[in-house]
Amino acid sequence: MLEFDKKQNLLIQSRYQYEMQDVDEPNLYREIFDYKSVPKVAFNMRHVPEDMPEEIWMTDTTFRDGQQSVSPFTVDQIVHLFKLLNRLGGPKGLVRQSEFFVYTEKDKRALQACQDLGFEFPEITTWIRANEKDFELVKNAGVKETGILVSCSDYHIFNKMKLTRAQAMDKYLGIVKAALARGIKPRCHFEDITRADFYGFVVPFAAELMKLSKESGIPIKIRACDTMGYGVPYYGAALPRSVPGIIYGLRHYAHVPSEQIEWHGHNDFYKVVANAGTAWMYGCSSINCSILGIGERTGNCPLEAMAIEYASLRGTTDGMDLSAITDMADYMEREIGIEISPRQPFVGRHFNVTRAGIHADGLLKDEEIYNIFDTKLILNRPAMVAVDATSGLAGVAHWMNGYFRLKDDQVIDKNDPLVVAVREMVAEQYAMGRNTVMGDEELEIMTRNADVERYERLLFHKSH
């Protein structure tokens, strides 16, 4: 069937109907996933077009998938983080939704407390098992949308659930119909989609869901879950691992609108951010994330990464408050006790800290030379220099200017006698065998010992 595509202004052959293949034996893609070696990336060089949606956004799973990997949050902690999600997303709601559990009394109290804040965004959604009884929990919570687990690889259908594909699809469609009958928007979580038979199960199932969506008038969403992080963003990669192929196939063959597709990735092979950006590029509107990327095993897609990626791709923050990222990281580390790698981009303590003396010299002359962007303006995280054995005069000078907040004609040069004196004290420490970075308090004491009068003037300037 030919359809005129108004976006491409071409006749597109799009109505090929894939039928569910109810095989006797599971397709486990053993040539790719033999389990005894690193999974292989196969290519067929079938290239699908990039098709960035008009609108893209992020959703959050910190309180659902994320919370499964850490000590449970308290109600107060969830409320505080929810406020930060609202602040980060800005007035356009670029952090569009946040999903909650609804099983324990604490889950219910947290959900209610966040509802009581009255925010339009993030919209609160839930996650339930494929069980009709769980719909009552959703209705009682006053939530309009819920995620439903619909595992789609033969690993899950045959080996875990002990069903055939036909039995699995029948079960899933029954649960979705039960949700629609209660006026609940289903968000179907296609678990393990990067090991699933895409044309033999995923597309036929998604097409059936779109028929139900059209009949009911209720938009059914599909969350494409790269549960094991097997997805790859490579041009010409073959299914089931191709992120471009998955997004294109859902849109072109199952006719799922971009705004009803969500990508949920994991970072097992270091590709979670690249895969998420690729999903956006090929027609997926929504990327599911968690704060700091917390989640099962290696974690989910970091929310802070995709907020920065949004600004990179769109050329604007569209009202997002990116400084909320810094406050999220501080709170997660200080109040919740989550250890953040010092070099984790955007949130680690040292992500914009340089140690090399030659780099410190460059920062002193022009911060833009060695800082990725104005991190103080955007993230409220000024560029810093770590003072250690290799820092040199430039490193000490940069630390002084940053620590005492000196600007313009107040900036201290690396050849200033005060800098030279402190650098000599630092060198003496390392000559005696020290092997750790100098702390701010130690350097402040050295500055005072080098010149009390100047130190007091610097301290006065810092406090004003």
Image (cartoon, rainbow, N blue to C red):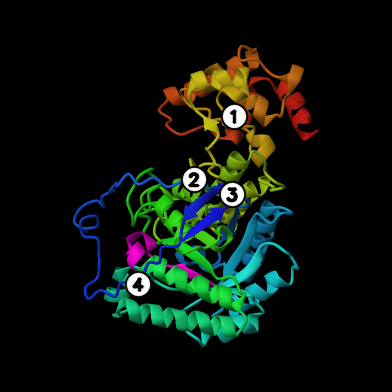
Mark 1 packing: few (<14 Cα in 10 Å), some, or many (20+)?
Answer: many
Which residue is located at x 36 percent, y 79 percent?
Answer: 168
**Mark 3 and mark 1: Cα distance apart in space:** 60 Å
Q: Quadrant of residue 402?
A: top right
Give the left or right position of residue 399, taking residue 432 as reference: right
Q: Amino acid at mark 4?
A: Met
Residue nearer the viewer, 86 or 337:
86
Which residue is located at x 75 percent, y 31 percent?
Answer: 462
Instruction: Name the front one of labels 3 and 1.
Output: 3
Q: Amino acid at mark 3?
A: Lys
Dot 1 or dot 2: first in sequence order is 2
* Residue to which mark 1 is pinned: 443
In magenta, the rendered stretch is 187-200
194 falls in the magenta region: yes
Give the left or right position of residue 300, taking residue 142 as reference: left
* Residue to which mark 3 is pinned: 7
**Mark 1 and mark 4: Cα distance apart in space:** 68 Å
Q: Which mark is residue 50?
A: 2
Which residue is located at x 70 percent, y 72 percent?
Answer: 115
Dot 2 or dot 3: first in sequence order is 3
Dot 1 or dot 4: first in sequence order is 4
Q: Are marks 2 and 3 in contact (CB under 8 Å)?
A: no
Q: Amino acid at mark 1?
A: Leu
Mark 3 packing: few (<14 Cα in 10 Å), some, or many (20+)?
Answer: few
**Mark 4 and mark 3: Cα distance apart in space:** 30 Å
Mark 4 packing: few (<14 Cα in 10 Å), some, or many (20+)?
Answer: some
Instruction: Name the front one of labels 1 and 4.
Output: 4
Dot 4 or dot 3: first in sequence order is 3
User: Would you say residue 361 is visible in this rendering?
Assistant: yes
Instruction: Name the front one of labels 1 and 2.
Output: 2
